[in-house]
Amino acid sequence: MTSVNGVDRPLHVANLLGFVMARLRDEIVVDVRPPFTELRVSHYRLLDMIPAEGARITDLAAHAGMTKQGLGQHVDYLQARGYAESARLESDRRVRLVRRTAKGDEATAFARAAIERVEEGWAERLGAERYADFRKALLEIGAGQPAR
């Protein structure tokens, strides 16, 4: 067991993975600087999911494991701040296609570099071989799951 804010929590895999994700989120944004201070890790994740040619809200929501409405709110937030743009398809006005803007591309590049920095730090901390084994185990356990 471990204590978090005075509450004892068992050290089962769900809590351990939660601790790792919390550390990852913290380390990604440790060097955040303007203009990206308005973005959360979930925004970076969404921006990274958007392919260069754009994607439909429905497809992004399925990929992210979110509702269309929830994902649409994230897109609206990003769009209002210049990171993404969306437009209705001429062939089907119900469909909203989302693309990253140049500013969104910059934020995505920042996030990818931050993740690379975190991975390098973890590999240094654990040793290259242990970190490679860690990644291999995560890939094996996650095999067959849709990317989210």
Image (cartoon, rainbow, N blue to C red):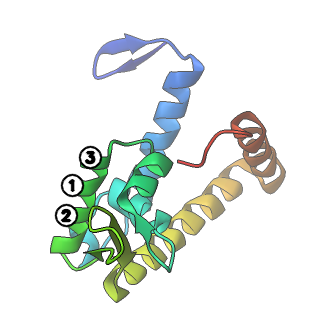
The residue at the far right in this view is 129
| Element class at badge 2 | helix
User: Which image quadrant is residue 139 in?
Assistant: top right
Q: Position of residue 37 (x, y in %)?
A: 23, 69
The residue at which mark 1 appears reads as 73
Q: Do the residues labelled 1 and 2 touch (CB within 8 Å)?
A: yes
- Residue at left 26%, top 56%? 72
Q: Distance between the residues labelled 1 and 2?
A: 6 Å
Q: Do the residues labelled 1 and 3 touch (CB within 8 Å)?
A: yes
Residue that numbered label 2 is attached to: 77
Q: Which residue is drawn at 55% across and 60% down?
A: 118
Spatial CA span between label 1 and label 3: 5 Å
Q: Mark 3 points at which residue?
A: 70
Q: Is mark 1 on a helix, strand or loop?
A: helix
Kind of residue at disc 2 = Tyr
Marks 3,2: beta carbons within 8 A: no
72 or 56, which lies in front?
56
Residue 137 is situated, as x and y percent measured from the top left of the image, at 77, 39
Q: Residue furthest front?
A: 91
Compare residues 15 and 141 and report the one nearer the observer. 141
Query: Does residue 117 lie above or below 87 as drawn?
Result: above
Furthest-left residue in view? Answer: 80
Mark 1 belongs to which amino acid? Answer: Gln
Q: Marks 3 and 2, Cα distance to the nearest angstrom?
A: 11 Å
- Residue 110 in view, yes or no: yes
Determine crowd level at label 3: few under 14, some 14-19, many 20+ residues with C-alpha closer than 10 A. Answer: few
Residue drawn at 43 percent across, 59 percent down:
45
